[in-house]
Image: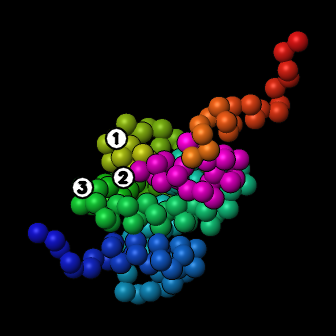
Amino acid sequence: MHDSRTTRRKFLAAVLTLGGAAATVPFLRSSQAWAASDAEMPAVMVKLARRLFPHEGMADAVYSEVVGQVLATIASNPATAGLIDGATQVLDSAASGSWIDLGEAEQLEVLRATENDPAVAGLRETVRFVFYENERVWKHIDYPGSSKEYGGYINRGFNDIDWLPEAE
């Protein structure tokens, strides 16, 4: 049976995906129709994604885009419905308060302490999968993408290293 009701989480995922995550975060924060935890979720998720997968110089807009895709992925799969809430509860509990209010070093400490929790690990792996499938991330880390459609790795990428000295 298909549940066609629109939940706040599904609506949030759709808004972030279709409307551009960076542009919608201020709208979500100012909307009184949202509970405080839902309004803060995109900011928390962006911070979490940046802590889990830090890349110097990567724009917040890329992390926001990834978060929008993660939220859409989670919203489209009933098996992952409580993933964000579960991970947030674990992180906040381990932080003895609000994880987002901690400094960077403390946030990383809490992430290390909770890395084996199923909710945190599940969210981390979902973010990882979506993050490294994003072509803007590929561009930032100079990953050229798949080689399969170009004849495989031998024909594209095998001999691209220019920083390694040639053998004598």
Measured from the top left, where is residue 162 in percent x and y? 82, 33
Query: Helix or strand or loop: what does disc 3 sit on?
Result: helix
Give the label on residue 79, or none: 3
Please give the residue where the numbered disc 1 appears in the rendered image. 117
In the picture of the structure, the residue carrying the numbered disc 2 is 87
Cα–Cα gap, marks 1 and 3:
17 Å
- 11 vs 112, nearest the viewer: 11
User: From the viewer's perspective, is residue 44 above or below residue 116?
Assistant: below
Q: Amino acid at mark 3?
A: Ala
Q: Quadrant of the N terminus?
A: bottom left
* Residue farthest toward the top in the current orientation of the protein: 168
Observer-side mark, 1 or 3, equals: 3
Front in this rendered view, residue 159 or 25: 159
Give the residue drawn at x 33%, y 73%. Answer: 10
| Residue placed most toward the observer, 2 or 28 | 2
Give the image quarter of residue 98: bottom left
Please, what secondary structure does the residue beneath circle 1 have?
loop
Asked if residue 24 lies in the magenta stretch, the reply is no
Asked if the residue at tag 2 contacts the one at tag 1, i.e. Cβ–Cβ closer than 8 Å, the answer is yes
Cβ atoms under marks 1 and 3 closer than 8 Å: no
- Point out the tag, 1 or 3, that comes first from the N-terminus: 3
Query: Residue at coordinates 35% horizontally, 78% vertically from top-left?
Result: 11
Instruction: Give yes or no for residue 139 being in the magenta stretch.
Output: yes
- First along the sequence among labels 3 and 2: 3
Q: Which residues are magenta?
A: 126-148
- Which one is in front, 117 or 10? 10
Foreground tag (3 vs 2): 3
The reply to whether residue 67 is visible in this rendering is yes
First in sequence, mark 1 or 2: give its number: 2
Q: Amino acid at mark 1?
A: Asp
